[in-house]
Amino acid sequence: MLREHLDLAAHALRLRLRIGPTDRAGRVLAGAAPVVLGLLAGFCLWGLQSELPWVVRQIHGPHPVRRIGYVLYVAAGSVPWVLALAAAAVGRWWLTRALGLGGTVLGFGILLAFGPMTTMFLFGQPVFWTILGAVVLLAPPTLLDRSARAGREATAVAVTFAAVMIASQSSGLWVYFTGSTILHMYVSWPLFAAAAVLLGHLAGEHRDRHRAVGAGLAGALWLTPGLLDEHITRHTLTTWVAGYVLLVALTVALAMGIRMIRRARPGESADPA
């Protein structure tokens, strides 16, 4: 009964916001949700690997309550999204949305209980999580791709993101922008991942423009921390946005070229006899 009431409430909200299954915005959100989920889960996998061991070792140091609270905050904001990816990989998107909602609410609760114990670019950041989580929660469930291919795509995005971040951190490839400890790969790789999914939707045999726009939106949303962090200069943010716009333009041009080559092949391979 609770699930039915939640589905009804979510459906009514989508109709109010004009993001239902028959709306273009709803189709775009359905295309963005798997990419956003993959990026979120990949970020969480990297964070769990890099942050939790250090924090657990420091629990016996000064202010143990705050450190324990940080452990709970990190776990509550990250573990549900990893489990949500596993649910989406087997086509259980209702469980994905439930886990995402639970992780967001639980993360907020622990944050209020123990105070702000994290910086902008460590995980569980409430505003960033809410913006990305809203895409997953509000995407029309009837339009979400439950195929094995879509599950593998989201999982590949997550695993590759985590692997790239772990390799960058272990090799010491840290890049500093105006004092903020931000990995260059943290910003650049999600944009390339979104562009790769965009290319697949535009250059594939069954082109889907709405899902392609959704993939592009997923990459653009990953730039939102730059709008929220006071340490990021306007020049840096402008460079990120301009670079992503150029990347999307090159991806669209490449997709058009692939489709033109594909159209020309049947005529060239025809047998003269």
Image (cartoon, helix red, strand yellow):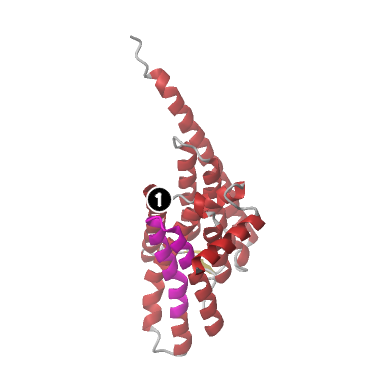
x and y, in percent, of residue 244 in the image: 55, 49
Q: Amino acid at mark 1?
A: Glu
Looking at the rendered structure, the secondary structure element under dot 1 is helix
Magenta includes 75? yes
- Place residue 224 in its image quadrant: bottom right
- Place residue 174 in its image quadrant: bottom left
Q: Residue at x 54, y 54 (%)?
A: 140
Question: In what quadrant of the picture does the C terminus appear?
Answer: top left
x and y, in percent, of residue 97 in the image: 48, 63
The residue furthest right is 16
Magenta includes 221? no
Instruction: Name the residue nearer the viewer: 6 or 73.
Output: 6
x and y, in percent, of residue 80 in the image: 43, 69
Q: Is residue 150 left or right of residue 4?
A: left
The residue furthest front is 1
Instruction: Kindly report the secondary structure that dominates the magenta region of the rendered protein.
Output: helix
| Above or below for 242 versus 227 | above
Q: Which residues are magenta?
A: 71-100
Q: Is residue 25 left or right of residue 154?
A: right
Name the residue beneath numbered marker 1.
Answer: 153
